[in-house]
C-alpha cells in the first residue's frame, strides 16, 4: 500500500510527513493507492490495517467498543471502554506507531486531558518520551492521575486549550512528534469507528451525533464513511451532527459564514470541549456539508441533564463532554432536524470515571436553550443567554 498526504484546501500532494500544507498552510489528509477494508469483527483497530498508513502496530486493544441500543431509541457507541477511557486511543495507536516508523523518540501534545492520558499510555507502551501541555486548572482529576501514572512530563500554561496548542506546535517545530488532531495520521485511527459501526449494525446509520471540540473526531468519522462509500461497501452515508457547548461553539457560526471567528474565552462545564479555535474546522465544515448534517450548540444545563439521563436510564456513566451527544440528539429531535424513526448513533466519547464530579441540574433555566455562540465573542457571560436579534 502506498500513501501520501493531500492538502484539503489547495489539493497539493505532499510526499513525506508534514502537519500542514507547505504551499497554503491548509490541513492535510492521508490518501491511499489501494484501500482494503475488511468488514468483519476484530480484536483492535488493527483489524483494519489495510486502511491504516503505518508499518508499526502499537496496540492496547483499542476499538471494537460496545454499541448498545439506548432507551432513547438511539444507538450508543460507548468509547469510554477504550483502554484509557476515550476514543483518543484509536488515533493514538496509529500516531504512536507512526512516530516509531519515523524513529521519533519524543511525543508532544496539547490537551484538555484525554489526548494527554491516551498519549501517555501509548508512549509508555512504545517506549517514547511523552510531554504534555495542558491549560492550568482545567483538566479533570482522573485524567491528571493517568498522566502521572504513565510518567508523562506535564507543563501547565495559563489560559485555554488553544494556548496550550500554540506551545505544543512550538515544541513540534523543535522536532518532537505532535500528537494533536492536526496530525492527519491520528485521524486515520479515529476513522475506524465508522467501519465498526457498519459491521455492528450491518449498514451505515442514518445519523451520527458527535460532541465537537477541536473537530478532529467528526472529521475522522466522516472520512471513514466516505472511504466505505468510495469502495461501494455501504449503500448510503449518515448525516454527521456535531454538538458543541454553547459557550464554546464557534463552528455553529462557521457553518453559516464559511470562516472561523474564534471564541476568545470559551466556557462550559464540558472541559474536554472547551475549545474556542478548533484546528480542524475546515474539515468539520466539509464533513457536515457533504453529509447533509449540521452543528448544534447545547447549554451546560442540557449537557448536565443528559449526563444524568445516560447514567440513570441507560446505565452508562460518561464524561461531561460525551453527554453533549445525547443533549444534541434531543435538541435535533425537538427541532425536527432528526426524526425518531431515523437510526442515529450517539458517540459517547469518554468514561465518567475520569471526571467524577456529578452536577445535579436543577429546573431548566428560563432561557434554557442557549445558542451563545451566535453572540459576538466577549459580549457577555456565556451559558443560557438567548440569541440576540439577527
Ligand atoms: C471526551 C471528549 N469528547 C469529545 C471531544 C472532542 O473531540 P474533537 O476535539 O476531536 O472534536 C474530546 C476532545 O478532547 C473529548 O475528550
Ligand atoms: Zn495547500
Image: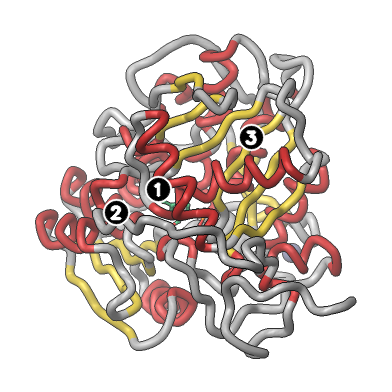
Is the C-beta separation of discs 3 and 2 under 8 Å? no
At 57% from the left edge and 55% from the top edge, which residue is drawn? 212
Q: Secondary structure at mark 2?
A: helix
Label 1, on which residue? Answer: 95
Q: Nearer the viewer, residue 61 or 80?
A: 80
| Quadrant including the N terminus | top right
Q: CA distance from mark 2 to mark 1?
A: 9 Å
On screen, 134 above or below 34?
below
Checking the image for residue 223, the label placed there is: none
| Among the two numbered marks 3 and 2 on one chain, the one whose residue lies closer to the N terminus | 2
Quadrant containing the C terminus in the rendered view: bottom right
What residue did someone put label 2 on? 119
- Dividing the picture into quadrants, the one containing residue 312 is top left
The residue indicated by pointer 3 is 208
Mark 3, ligand 1, within 8 Å: the answer is no
For the question of whether residue 111 can be seen, the reply is: yes
Q: Is mark 2 within 8 Å of ligand 1?
A: no
Amino acid at each position: 500500500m502506498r500513501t501520501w498526504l493531500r492538502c484539503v484546501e489547495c489539493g497539493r500532494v505532499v510526499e513525506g510527513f508534514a502537519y500542514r500544507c507547505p504551499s497554503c498552510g491548509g490541513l492535510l489528509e492521508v490518501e491511499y493507492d489501494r484501500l482494503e477494508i475488511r468488514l468483519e469483527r476484530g480484536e483492535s483497530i488493527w483489524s483494519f490495517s489495510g486502511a491504516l498508513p503505518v508499518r508499526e502496530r502499537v496496540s492496547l486493544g483499542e476499538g471494537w467498543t460496545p454499541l448498545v441500543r439506548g432507551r432513547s431509541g438511539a444507538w450508543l457507541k460507548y468509547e469510554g471502554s477504550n483502554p484509557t477511557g476515550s476514543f483518543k486511543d484509536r488515533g493514538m495507536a496509529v500516531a504512536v506507531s507512526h512516530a516509531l516508523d519515523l524513529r521519533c523518540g519524543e511525543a508532544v501534545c496539547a490537551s484538555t486531558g484525554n489526548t494527554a492520558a491516551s498519549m501517555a499510555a501509548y508512549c509508555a507502551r512504545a517506549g517514547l518520551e511523552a510531554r504534555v501541555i495542558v491549560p492550568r486548572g482545567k483538566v479533570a482529576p482522573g485524567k491528571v492521575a493517568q498522566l502521572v501514572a504513565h510518567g508523562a512530563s506535564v507543563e501547565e500554561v495559563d489560559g485555554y486549550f488553544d494556548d496550550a496548542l500554540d506551545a505544543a506546535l512550538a515544541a513540534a517545530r523543535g522536532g518532537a512528534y505532535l500528537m494533536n488532531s492536526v496530525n492527519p495520521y491520528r485521524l486515520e485511527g479515529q476513522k475506524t469507528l465508522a467501519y465498526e459501526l457498519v459491521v455492528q449494525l450491518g449498514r451505515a446509520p442514518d445519523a451520527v451525533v458527535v460532541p465537537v471540540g477541536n473537530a478532529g473526531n467528526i472529521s475522522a468519522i466522516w472520512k471513514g464513511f466516505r472511504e466505505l462509500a468510495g469502495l461501494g461497501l455501504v449503500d448510503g452515508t449518515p448525516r454527521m451532527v456535531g454538538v458543541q457547548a454553547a459557550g464554546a461553539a464557534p463552528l455553529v457560526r462557521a457553518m453559516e459564514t464559511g470562516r472561523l471567528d474564534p471564541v476568545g474565552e470559551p466556557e462550559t462545564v464540558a472541559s474536554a470541549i472547551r475549545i474556542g479555535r478548533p484546528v480542524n474546522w475546515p474539515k468539520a465544515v466539509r464533513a457536515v456539508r457533504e453529509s447533509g448534517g449540521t452543528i448544534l450548540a447545547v447549554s451546560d444545563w442540557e449537557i448536565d441533564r443528559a449526563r444524568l439521563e445516560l447514567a440513570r436510564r441507560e446505565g452508562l456513566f460518561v464524561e461531561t463532554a460525551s453527554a453533549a451527544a445525547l443533549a444534541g440528539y434531543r435538541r435535533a429531535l425537538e427541532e425536527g432536524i432528526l426524526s425518531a424513526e431515523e437510526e442515529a448513533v450517539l458517540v459517547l466519547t469518554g468514561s465518567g470515571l475520569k471526571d467524577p464530579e456529578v452536577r445535579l441540574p436543577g429546573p431548566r433555566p428560563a432561557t434554557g436553550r442557549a445558542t451563545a455562540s451566535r453572540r459576538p465573542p466577549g459580549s457577555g457571560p456565556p451559558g443560557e443567554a438567548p440569541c440576540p436579534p439577527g
